Image: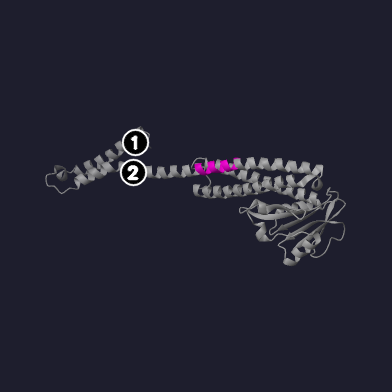
Amino acid sequence: MLTIHGLVDSALITAAISNAMPPEGPAVWFDLIEPTADEDADVEKMLGVAVPTRAEMEEIEASSRLYAEDGALYMTALVQVLSDTAAPRLTPITFILVGNRLATVRYDAPKSFDLFRTRAERPGFGLVDGRGVLLGLLETIVDRLADSLERVGGEIDTLSMAVFRSRREREKGLEEAITTVGRLGGAVSRAEESIVSLARMFHFLAEHGGRDRLDPDGRARLITLDHDIRSLAEHSKSLDAKVNFVMSATLGLVGLEQNTIVKIFSILAVVFMPPTLIASIYGMNFHAMPELDKPWGYPMALGLMVASVSVTFAVFKWKRWL
């Protein structure tokens, strides 16, 4: 789908109609969502530049994601999708800056685009051209990324407190805690990938922006974005360290619980070893065992068994092995 956005009174005017210009104002933003070949051709004709294919957008080399061609800047970044859910993922989005007009190519629907569009359609928003749209989109993407990291950080802190509670107070089992830690670790890892991708894009835009592409206000906003993404990078490293710590602690607690179970079985084996020995002795078929013919023989054997268990248990308690 091709959505063309015009500009009237410093606000976006949207026309979600392929092959058509907005009813009012100059076109400043061409948003391609899972475009068809005809829609790609229409945008190429309007802007005079090539539109990258999905395969080209998914290239991992920096030179394939960030480059200048025919007077246009091509910038592909990894952006989080479904960051509010338990299964966030990354999607590549290409930003093409052609003079003062912007084209975006995407095959998913990050919430940041809808949030920016909603704000930008308010009268007097302050947009001038496509460069402002680009910076506004990037600011919204960074804000969403920060919110995602903040939410993951809160979940990590909650899980950490739950894991380090006593065994009786622990609401979740350690197996479930390990699963949760793995999920949070994956979320942090994806956020770090997005941060690195955006940081490279900001650096590229700063180098190739120049005075003819970004005005002083735009350059100041780009510097602020660079500072923000650096802060998020540090924060993500801190969260990654927390995830590793909680994972190590959880695995350690699992090992302790397993050792406790083995310890209990070992103690039981030692406690019942003396009565087993006594029972084995009196179970031997010898004729010269006077206790077998006495009426007190059976109670005596039982008493010895109970006494041996009691003495062994008392020794364990005295040694603080229980």
Q: Residue at x 52, y 48 (%)?
A: 178
List x then y, in percent, for residue 268: 33, 43
Question: Quadrant of the rendered structure where residue 104 is?
Answer: bottom right
Is residue 143 shown to the viewer in this render?
Answer: no
List x then y, in percent, for residue 317: 36, 35
Question: Quadrant of the rendered structure where residue 267 is?
Answer: top left
Question: Is 243 one of the magenta-colored residues?
Answer: yes
Predominant SS of the magenta segment: helix
Report the magenta residues as a range. Answer: 238-248
Name the one closer to the observer, 306 or 14.
Answer: 14
Q: Find numbered disc 1 in the image and state the secondary structure of the residue it sits on.
A: helix
Name the one closer to the observer, 117 or 54.
Answer: 54
Instruction: Kindly give the residue lying farthest to the top in the view shown.
Output: 318
Say whether residue 230 is left or right of residue 120.
Answer: left
Is residue 138 shown to the viewer in this render?
Answer: yes
Label 2 vs 1, first from the N-terminus: 2
Callout 2 environment at 10 Å: few (<14), some (14 to 19), or many (20+)? Answer: few
Which label sits on residue 316? 1
Say whether residue 234 is left or right of residue 96.
Answer: left
Which label sits on residue 268? 2
Q: CB of mark 2 within 8 Å of CB of mark 1?
A: no
Question: Is 106 one of the magenta-colored residues?
Answer: no
Instruction: Kindly give the residue lying farthest to the bottom in the view shown.
Output: 38
User: How much space separates mark 2 and mark 1, taking CA atoms?
Assistant: 11 Å
Q: As shown in the figure, which amino acid type bears the numbered disc 2? A: Leu
